Image (tube, rainbow, N blue to C red):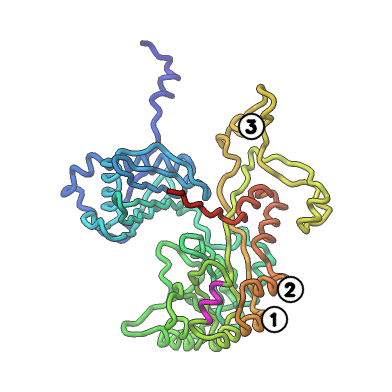
């Protein structure tokens, strides 16, 4: 059968495959000893990751389920199912990615984590590989990070000028503890780098005692740890170097927290703290170091939540109802807001969502942006902490302190045309509890 040359080229066009360039931990994979695994799994693994990247995914989850394995792509925080894989192929893909990430392919009953330096479309990427044991086999989770778009500066994260000023005011007093909180995998680590870079490194001596992995801190001096030195000795050394602010690894135990609060009068300490929200962080800190120490030493807690950004190609302008603006606390001068295009379902000839925004394939949101919230330990907040730090009282005090909340910062992004009210509402809606099925 004859083919038109142009049609033939389109049929033969192949997906550009990712190039794996070596394990991030420096372990050299023995491909010869695993020649059969490489032969059957390397190309399918590249296909899987490349397809996800082409679709704009930030994560891939492969879940073994008997003879098949479910596959999900996470695009801007929303899960999309992908065709299932045969169980044996999913296992082989998991094993080859573990091998390329410098992990032990013979260990399947323990969680493992690693990463692969990669290149896709002539840009540097890393593929973070996490495996956890399960009933049906190892669960594979891949996180895909574009290294040319690392978010470490306030400009990259679209932090408001008001938020930057408030963070600087709390962290440039050369004393106190400033925490960044959030549950695991929520973006708290990235937020901590952004917060650190709000501080003027030309006016203050900034040091990092943290393991930042593949992230590069700008104008922050890495701490050269000496063998046998503990955290207290490290703080003493940095004080002799006239450090103004020290950036730490996440504070995860009472002993570390106690040392941090012991030194809070001498130096400003910034660190990530694993907690669901600021109220939970304060509750844990009180149990670890006491309410007096928390009220005296804690300066602020920063947290964030991600919201999807409207596609610039297809977002639709509309005139908001003045009553809606008043209910949201927005100024009446706002004449235009934006939303995703709405197809006319009643007209069969009207363009579909895919046709309204052909460049984005019917997905009217591209990428995500953080909405920030800052709890400041004002005199009023100190009293709340000393009286037991009830979550409802903390929220009430934040309102009285005119705190920048996630909702308030989200409305800023709506006004700027970066997201929609509908997306903000979806993001802030409490998660629905799953109902147990009756047997």
Task: Please determine whether, in this image, residue 366 is positioned above or below residue 352.
Answer: below
Q: Which residue is mark 1?
A: 380
Instruction: Choose the circle earlier in sequence order: 3 or 2.
Output: 3
- Tell me if label 2 and label 1 are in contact, CB under 8 Å: yes
Of the residues tagged 3 and 1, which is closer to the observer?
A: 1
Tell me the quadrant of the picture where the N terminus can be found.
top left
- Label 2, label 1: how far apart the Cα atoms are: 9 Å
Give residue 42's position: percent from left, percent from top: 28, 42
Q: Quadrant of residue 197?
A: bottom right
Dominant SS of magenta comes to helix
Task: Look at the numbered disc 3 and give the secondary structure of its residue.
Answer: helix
Task: Look at the numbered disc 1 and give the secondary structure of its residue.
Answer: helix
Assess disc 3: are there few (<14), some (14-19) or many (≥20) residues with their C-alpha within 10 Å of its C-alpha. Answer: many
Would residue 417 be visible to someone looking at this image?
yes
Q: Which residue is mark 3?
A: 356
Instruction: Choose the circle earlier in sequence order: 3 or 1.
Output: 3
Q: Identify which residue is drawn at 26% across, 52% down.
A: 99
- Tell me if label 3 and label 2 are in contact, CB under 8 Å: no
Residue segment shown in magenta: 280-286
Task: Please determine whether, in this image, residue 253 is positioned above or below residue 59.
Answer: below
Would residue 156 be visible to someone looking at this image?
no
Q: Is residue 211 left or right of residue 347?
A: left
């Amino acid at each position: 059968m004859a083919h038109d040359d142009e049609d033939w080229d389109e049929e033969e066009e192949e997906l550009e495959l990712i190039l794996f360039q070596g394990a991030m931990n420096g372990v050299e994979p023995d491909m010869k000893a695993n020649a059969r695994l490489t032969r059957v799994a390397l190309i399918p693994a590249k296909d899987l990751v490349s397809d996800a990247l082409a679709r704009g995914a930030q994560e891939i989850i492969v879940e073994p389920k008997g003879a098949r394995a479910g596959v999900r792509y996470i695009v801007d925080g929303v899960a999309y199912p992908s065709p299932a894989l045969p169980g044996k192929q999913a296992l082989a893909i998991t094993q080859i990615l573990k091998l390329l990430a410098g992990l032990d392919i013979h260990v399947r009953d323990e969680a493992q984590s690693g990463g692969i330096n990669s290149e896709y479309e002539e840009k540097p990427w890393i593929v973070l590989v996490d495996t956890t044991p399960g009933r049906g086999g190892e669960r594979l989770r891949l996180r895909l990070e574009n290294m040319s778009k690392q978010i470490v500066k306030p400009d990259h994260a679209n932090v408001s000028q008001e938020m930057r000023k408030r963070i600087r005011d709390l962290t440039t007093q050369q004393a106190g503890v400033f925490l960044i909180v959030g549950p695991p995998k929520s973006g708290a680590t990235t937020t901590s780098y952004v917060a650190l870079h709000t501080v003027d490194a030309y006016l203050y001596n900034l040091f990092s005692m943290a393991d930042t992995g593949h992230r590069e801190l700008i104008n922050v001096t890495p701490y050269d740890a000496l063998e046998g030195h503990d955290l207290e000795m490290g703080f003493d050394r940095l004080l002799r170097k006239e450090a103004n602010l020290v950036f730490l690894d996440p504070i995860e135990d009472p002993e570390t927290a106690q040392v941090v609060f012991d030194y809070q009068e001498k130096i400003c300490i910034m660190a990530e703290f694993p907690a669901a929200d600021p109220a939970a962080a304060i509750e844990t800190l009180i149990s670890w170091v006491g309410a007096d120490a928390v009220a005296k030493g804690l300066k602020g807690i920063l947290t964030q939540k991600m919201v999807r950004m409207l596609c610039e190609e297809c977002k639709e302008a509309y005139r908001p109802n003045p009553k809606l603006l008043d209910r949201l606390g927005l100024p009446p001068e706002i004449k235009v807001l934006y939303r995703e295009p709405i197809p006319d379902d009643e007209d069969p000839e009207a363009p579909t969502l895919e046709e309204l925004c052909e460049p984005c394939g019917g997905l009217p949101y591209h990428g995500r942006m953080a909405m920030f919230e800052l709890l400041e330990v004002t005199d009023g907040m100190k009293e709340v902490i000393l009286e037991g730090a009830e979550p409802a009282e903390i929220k009430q005090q934040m309102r009285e302190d005119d705190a920048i909340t996630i909702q308030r910062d989200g409305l800023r992004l709506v006004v700027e045309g970066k997201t929609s009210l509908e997306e903000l509402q979806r993001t802030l809606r409490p998660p629905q509890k799953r109902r147990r099925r009756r047997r």
